[in-house]
Amino acid sequence: MAFQKAVKGTALIGGGAIATVFGLSQFSQYRNKHGALVQVEAEEGAPVRREHLPTREQQLAALQSSGEFDVLVIGGGATGCGCALDAATRGLKTALLERDDFSSGTSSRSTKLIHGGVRYLQKAIMNLDFEQYRMVKEALEERAHLLQSAPHLSAPLPIMLPIYKWWQLPYYWVGIKLYDLVAGSQCLKSSYVLTKARALELFPMLRRDKLVGAIVYYDGQHNDARMNLAIALTAARYGAATANYTEVRTLLKSPGTGGGRPRVCGVRCRDVITGKEFDVRAKCVINATGPFTDSVRKMDDQEVPNICQPSAGVHIVMPGYYSPDNMGLLDPATSDGRVIFFLPWEKMTIAGTTDSPTDVTSHPIPTEEDINFILSEVRNYLGADVEVRRGDVLAAWSGIRPLVTNPDSKDTQSLSRNHVVTVSDSGLITIAGGKWTTYRAMARDTIDTAIREHNLKAGSCRTMGLQLEGAQDWSPTLYIRLVQDYGLESEVAQHLASTYGGKAFEVAKIAQVTGKRWPIVGKRLVSEFPYIEAEVVYGVKEYARTAVDIISRRTRLAFLNVQAAHEALPRIVDIMGKELNWCEQKKKEELETAKTFLYYEMGYKVKTDQLTDSSEISLVPSDIERYKKRFHMFDKDKKGFITIVDVQRVLQSISVQIDENTLHEILNEVDLNKNGQVELNEFLQLMSAIQKGRVSGSRLAVLMKSAEEKLRRRQPIPVDRSGGGL
């Protein structure tokens, strides 16, 4: 009864606000376009789409031999690639340079949401800020476009907002309904209210005490790095000369006409892989470098003030059992006033983000403080029967969000939540700020400015409704054909379909025969994940040039489980070595570079920090004796340490075989001083860390416990990872 009264009261309270926003929505000049119609218009108006993707070598040759380009974009993130796609589809001669890999920066380290921004709408209404309202309106329209242009990489996601106080129900219900209303015809699905019982049924991990009910609304979710890559590949198919690992060294300038200021007319760049330097000339140069915006602006003018104020956002990934398969969670007010999302992603659970000032760097590192903050907030919303363990953090990363001040605004101290397009006196165009969801609108505004400022001959934007790489031949049931036609595992087939769309057949065609009855083709890189070896080969065709490109952006293995990525690296390097003709020295360098990336940027370091030589052993005497007995089962000679030989001897005695490489990996996880052996003190430190929840899923601990129990029963010992993390 109380619940029904609250809902009725909610309707009365929200009526005036809804009417106000409805009026604003009608007043807005933004166009609502229907996807099917616009798709036809976009495809018909655009230049011819290439059937075959040019190689990186062909793209570099085009950059050096094609004369002057109309547009040259610096930066291969979502915005930069969006600018290249927009320009190319308008028929402009387009080039794009990225000093690292496509999506190597912020664009691959997002919360994976395609959203309008519920909190921004709240601020727009509270502060009567029409500009903020327009930003949300535009983002919601772009959300619909992104879901239509790459349906294989994106999908609507229901997000639950749990309510723990009765007064919050009408307050949040009004806000969420306004969010639906502003979306208008582009609303994904209507939000709704849940009773306490129904909320717990859909999200059983929720904290039960004081729970009143919940509100569920819809936003979009995507595979951000693959989406960025799809934009880049689509631009290449429409004729853009795109090259990753091509660094801009300086801006080229021509004398100004009539004694005026020199004008930017191109760049001097360097192929990072070969070291070769060359010039690329263009009528218009666009700076779309995200957090590095100011460094390119200072290439143009050393005296220009900084406009970028970088902010670091940390995310963590936990096992999938922490959240339902298809329901996210929003914490609208954390202990320090920030917003935390808790979302299912790629069969895992992603939680984040933090928001703290940082320095601009190409290699942001997640901190233990940020990881523990996220875990603390997660604990506040999960039930007491769900133990949130530090050891269940499978990966962690930090992304730098480039917040900007508008240099053309009177108030240059205030941050702009929208994007900013500026033109320098020398003609350099800079696009900065904004958000992932609005990349297409940002690109449209940027190319419109380029055409106007540089007198380029081109029509209006043609990217609304334009399908991205893989979308054209995709259908929800495509994976069934992959299973039937090629003999792939169902899980692998679903993964390929949702990653490559219609291009999944090209990956399946080069998949290796397994030699098993089933699956017929598709050798996995690691047993727990559906990534297969053929994806490494195909990744090279998609311009991957380093092992890091494969583990973090062509596949998402590093973002899902850093330890699994570490184990897959040797095989990935071997395959890439064959494709790219690497010598043994180059393969060793790639392996070490990728390990360093995992160690610092993806949270492997914080794993080792949980178990060090100085880790405290806080076990009761009875536990110490129990673990000593278990250890001495392997250390028969009472040496004080165990080696791979000791483990093999015990396994042979119970008729279990594990390959030597796997055993080396298992011992190396615990071998703190890396001397090839596990000492008694190291084993006790491990067991103490497991009891505290700092470490989970240790394969050595599982193996030794199983051996102790099964020496009597002679049963096989499971050694697969069981959700263990950092």
Image (tube, rainbow, N blue to C red):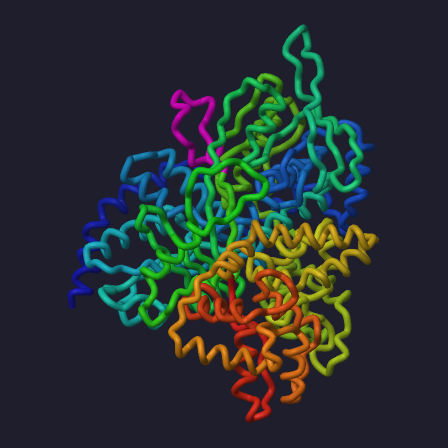
Quarter holding the N terminus?
bottom left
Toward the viewer: 291 or 570?
Answer: 570
Expressed as whole percent of the image width and height from the top left, the position of residue 103 reads 61, 46
Q: Quadrant of residue 617?
A: bottom left
Q: Could you tell me which residue is drawn at 73 percent across and 49 percent down?
A: 545
Q: Identify the residue shown where x is 57% and y is 69%.
A: 679
- From the image, give the main secondary structure of the stretch colored magenta: loop
Task: Give the total number of marks visible in the rendering.
Answer: 0
Q: Relative to 435, is 209 above or below? A: below
Q: Residue furthest front?
A: 638
**Vertical arrangement, residue 242 with respect to residue 218, above or below:** above
In the image, is residue 296 part of the stretch drawn in magenta? no
Residue 277 point in image, percent of width and height:
78, 31
Residue 413: in magenta span: yes
Q: Would you say 689 lies left or right of 6 here? A: right
Residue 544 seen in render: no
| Residue 658 in the image, given as x and y percentages of width and height | 67, 79
Most foreground residue, 393 or 287 = 393
619 is higher (above) or lower (below) than 190: below
Would residue 321 appear left or right of 384 to someone viewing this image? right
Q: Is residue 242 left or right of residue 169?
A: right
Vertical side of 66 occupied by 502: above or below: below
Give the camera-side residue of 314 and 515: 314
Regarding residue 696, the answer to whether it shows in the image is yes
Residue extending farthest top? 259
Q: Quadrant of residue 197?
A: bottom left
Residue 530 x/y as whole percent: 63, 68
> What residue range appears in magenta?
402-419
